[in-house]
Amino acid sequence: MPRALVFFMHNPMPPRSGAHRRCLQMLSGLREAGYSVTLASSTLHTETPWSSQAVSGLREAGIEDVEVFDRGSWDRGCDALTRRWDRLTRAPLHTQLPEVACPSSLKVWFNRLAEKVLPDVLLMNYCWFDQLVRHRMAPREIIETHDIITVNSALRRTVQQMLVDYENGTVDPRLFDEQFMASFTPAPAAEEMDIYARYDDVIAISPAEESLLRSRLQHTRVRCIPVSDTPRWVDNTYDGPLVITAGPNPFNSQACLYFAEKVWPLVVKQHPSARAVIAGTAALSKGVRGAGLQTLGFVEDLTSLYAAAPMVVSAVFMGTGQQIKVVEALAHGVPVVALKSKTLSHLLEDGETGFIVSSAEEMASRIVQLFRDRSLCSRLGGEGRLRVAADSASHKGLPALFG
């Protein structure tokens, strides 16, 4: 059986963000394509601490081995000496990539693990961690982008500053401008493109990012593998509150604020009995409030919320990558109302599996329409689930990449 070694910075079990779900999708694809999979990670970077239950859950999902680097006191001492030596002997680095520390102890550990596994395929996640790789560790080396890091980081800094200003009483008009991305799209750093060029294959998560990477990488194969999911055959009632899921990034924080400030008051004015819940670990502004609007924090299993939801709403219009929340909602048979964005899945089609809107007023109108027409919710949600099922079947084993 061919072997695959995968490095992912977080514990993805249970999945708390779109990145976690994407990692599980790729691990499943490798398994379906016939690979024995070793997942490598570290306690140094993860936003979700590792536990024995997480390791057991991954092994039950078919991952043969889970290896987690946990730096001890001896490693910390060696890393400190290495850093001191590097400062004395190397010229200062001028980098546009946000810094993610990969100490020498982690590099040694990962290289020893690769020598032990002898993978046929090496799959890295995020370009930060290329520094762990001694290239040609495997006959085939693949990197999953998730986002174009230097573009995403520039957007994050801008949005975070706008949110800070809002909390301090200053509202930047761009904070609620649905056309923001049309006028502010930073270029990717050449340094990041140089990293991708070292790999045999680069995986993009959306057609927009595939096009950007293809235009800059002449000798590396670029493959677009959109987010896919499996249908969940829940007993939908469509009589509960609308659902917003918001993982821990500033684009979700901004979207929740946009919804609460610009959309929800219009909905309540037309439909006073409307209710909404926000589930997830996004940092929420003081402006995220309103009659009938409830915040739940992290919800480990969203099934009961999806089963009752008449719709899922995504007010995200900033950021890169792909909105995994949209695919997950459609998989549960729930229609989606979303602002127009390059990060939307092709499975969301206006008027067929939900609605794609361009303004707060249009979003509020579609939300009220779905609240008042449960049969429309059922029709759109049912079609969405069928399309997710067909899309999942077409990606079985990720044949475009691993077959």
Image (cartoon, rainbow, N blue to C red):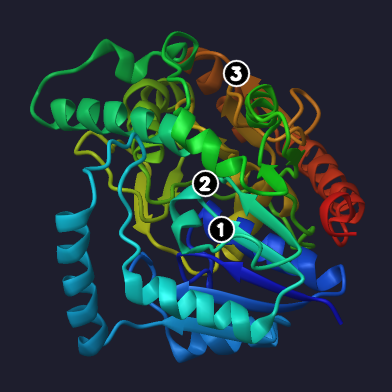
Q: Residues within 10 Å of mark 1 (few under 14, many from 20)?
A: some
Q: Position of residue 67 (x, y in %)?
A: 52, 84
Q: Residues within 10 Å of mark 2 (few under 14, many from 20)?
A: many
Q: Residue at x 32, y 32 (%)?
A: 257
Tell me the kind of residue under disc 1.
Leu
Q: Give the numbered dot on residue 243.
A: 2
Q: Residue at x 58, y 90 (%)?
A: 56
Q: Earlier in the sequence, mark 3 or mark 2?
A: 2
Q: Residues at badges 2 and 1 in contact (C-beta under 8 Å)?
A: yes
Tell me the kind of residue under disc 2.
Val
Q: Circle 3 is placed at which residue position?
A: 357
Tell me the kind of residue under disc 3.
Val
Q: Which secondary structure, mark 3? A: strand
Q: Circle 1 is placed at which residue position?
A: 305
Q: Position of residue 166 (x, y in %)?
A: 17, 26
Q: Quadrant of the C terminus?
A: bottom right
Left/right of residue 365 with respect to residue 141 in the rendered view: left
Q: Position of residue 344 (x, y in %)?
A: 64, 32
Q: Residue at x 22, y 59 (%)?
A: 86
Quadrant location of residue 355?
Answer: top right
Q: Which secondary structure, mark 2? A: strand
Quadrant location of residue 167?
Answer: top left
Pair 3/1: label in front: 3
Q: Residue at x 50, y 55 (%)?
A: 130
Q: CA distance from mark 3 to mark 1?
A: 23 Å
Q: Residues at badges 3 and 2 in contact (C-beta under 8 Å)?
A: no
Observer able to see residue 241:
yes
Q: Quadrant of the N terminus?
A: bottom right
Q: Residues at badges 3 and 1 in contact (C-beta under 8 Å)?
A: no
